[in-house]
Image (tube, rainbow, N blue to C red):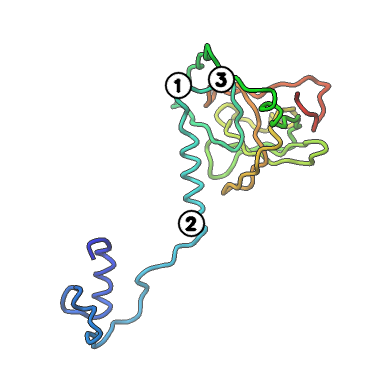
Amino acid sequence: KPILPSFAKRVEKFFCLDHELSFADCSPTHFPKRINAYEHLLKRIDPKHIEAMTTASTEHLEATPSPQPSPTKGVGSEALASPGPGSRVPSPVASASPDFISIDDFAKLDLRIGAVLECGFVDGSDKLLRFLLDAGELGQRQIFSGIRAAYGEPEKLIGRKVVFIANLAPRKMRFGVSEGMILSAGSGGDDLHLLDVDSGALPGMQVK
């Protein structure tokens, strides 16, 4: 009763009690003399609602900028925070002593060229764009990228070639499945810039 007071009151009303429930009412000899007309006391939670809340919370957490963002970052299924109207996020200063990785660490990334077949806004998100890429021998890839603030006319990106991470585990979002991460440079918000590739680079080619 201290934890769910409203629920307890509905139970008391349902059982037509003339007193508040207490532990004494747990006795097997205490039965209600009558009950009111049937009504739902609690409604079962729809798993779809839980999934939607989890996805929304995850998107909100990913929108929180890192205290020391990298000067060059990839933006894929992660949604980046947008600055306020008329504001601009300052470019971060490159670290004087970056964390080194081995060539084996770099080799774990499967970077590929993708040609943009489709690009548009995502209903229900003010940060994401939906890309459909021609990835050559890998087929087509759908990727959600948090660069909407930087590219307000996504249709102009159709036909452009981008660099994306092809071996990033697919991520299920409430908008669909994101199958990779498109790389861009910048500090976030409207300061994001897709990487250009040479005209000779074909969809599906590896970046080494």
> Is label 3 in a helix, a strand or a loop?
loop
Residue 138 circle label? none
Residue 156: image location, x then y, percent: 69, 29
> Is label 1 in a helix, a strand or a loop?
loop
Image vertical order of residue 172 relative to residue 68, above or below:
below
Q: Residue at x 52, y 37 (%)?
A: 126
**Label 2, residues with CA under 10 Å away: few <14, some 14-19, many ≥20:** few
Label whose residue precedes the other's in the sequence (2 or 3): 2
Q: Amino acid at mark 3?
A: Asp
Residue 49 circle label? 2
Instruction: Quickly name the residue at label 1.
Output: 87
Residue 205: image location, x then y, percent: 80, 29
Residue 196: image location, x then y, percent: 71, 21
Residue found at the very far top of the displayed protein: 96
> Is label 2 in a helix, a strand or a loop?
helix
Label whose residue precedes the other's in the sequence (1 or 3): 1
Instruction: Quickly name the residue at label 3.
Output: 99
- Viewer-nearest of labels 1 and 2? 2
